Image (cartoon, rainbow, N blue to C red):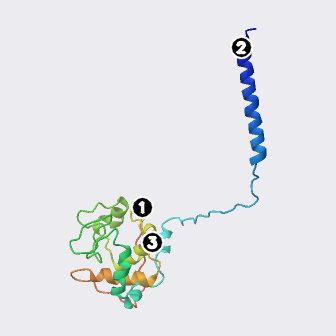
Amino acid sequence: MNPYVNMAAGALLATVFVMMSVSIASEGIFHSPIPEKEGFAIVAAEEPAGGEAAEAAPAAVPVGQLLASADAAAGATVFKKCQSCHSIEKGGPNKVGPDLWGVVDRPVASHEGFAYSAAMKDFSKGGSEHWTFDNLNHFLTAPKSFVKGTAMGFAGLKNDTERANLLAYLREQSDSPAPLPDPNAAPAAPPATN
């Protein structure tokens, strides 16, 4: 036999032997058994089927009752959460979101020069849907639940007082503020969303 072939075969066998020895030794040194109980279980809440999520999003208190004791000056402070994405001046620029001057009772997805998401365009029903106090209340509570697929990345305002103050502030940011809803009126059902 050729001595070079013998050396090559010996080198190959030696390499395989060293690799197997290192593998066996590492397994013995660094072995960690599977824990009996998981350290942290992540449980994701399942979303109800068939548009029920939109009904779960709104607050339990009717918007008329919320606005009866709302403070628009406090709403200006709450609006600071919105300022990074929205302007509120008359004729103000669009940012990540549209300018919100006169948003109360404005048709949904209708602000000039802003490219709305497909979900928001669908929700607008061709311009027939308006940003009523009820719609704004539901949307500001949980935007992604109210308008499925919206590009708005805001988690929502769960606090009724903060949301009411913000609605009162948004109402005042208009040439002719919309009339306040009747505080004794029953809560309106949210419109069907996609």
- Specify whether 76 is left or right of 20: left
- Circle 2 sits on which residue? 5
Q: How many angstroms separate mark 2 from mark 3 (CA)?
A: 73 Å
Residue 128, image x, y percentages: 29, 69
Query: Is there CB contact under 8 Å for labels 2 and 3?
Result: no
Above/below status of 25 relative to 131 = above
- Say if residue 190 shows up in the picture: no
Q: Which residue occupies 76% across, 44% down?
A: 27
Q: What residue type is labelled 3?
A: Ala
Query: Is there CB contact under 8 Å for labels 2 and 1?
Result: no
Q: What residue type is labelled 2?
A: Val
Which residue, as the protein is rendered here, is positioned at the far top? Answer: 1
Q: In which quarter of the image is the N terminus?
A: top right
| Residue 69, picture quadrant | bottom left
Q: Which residue occupies 28% across, 83% down?
A: 172
Above/below status of 175 relative to 28 = below
Q: What element carries label 3?
A: loop
> Which of the two residues, 39 or 130, is positioned nearer the viewer here?
39
Q: How many angstroms separate mark 2 from mark 1 (CA)?
A: 67 Å
Q: Which amino acid does label 1 sit on?
A: Gly
- Circle 1 sits on which residue? 149
Q: How many angstroms separate mark 1 from mark 3 (CA)?
A: 12 Å
- Circle 3 sits on which residue? 142
Mark 1 is surrounded, within 10 Å at the Cα level, by few (under 14), some (14 to 19) or many (20 or more) other residues, namely some
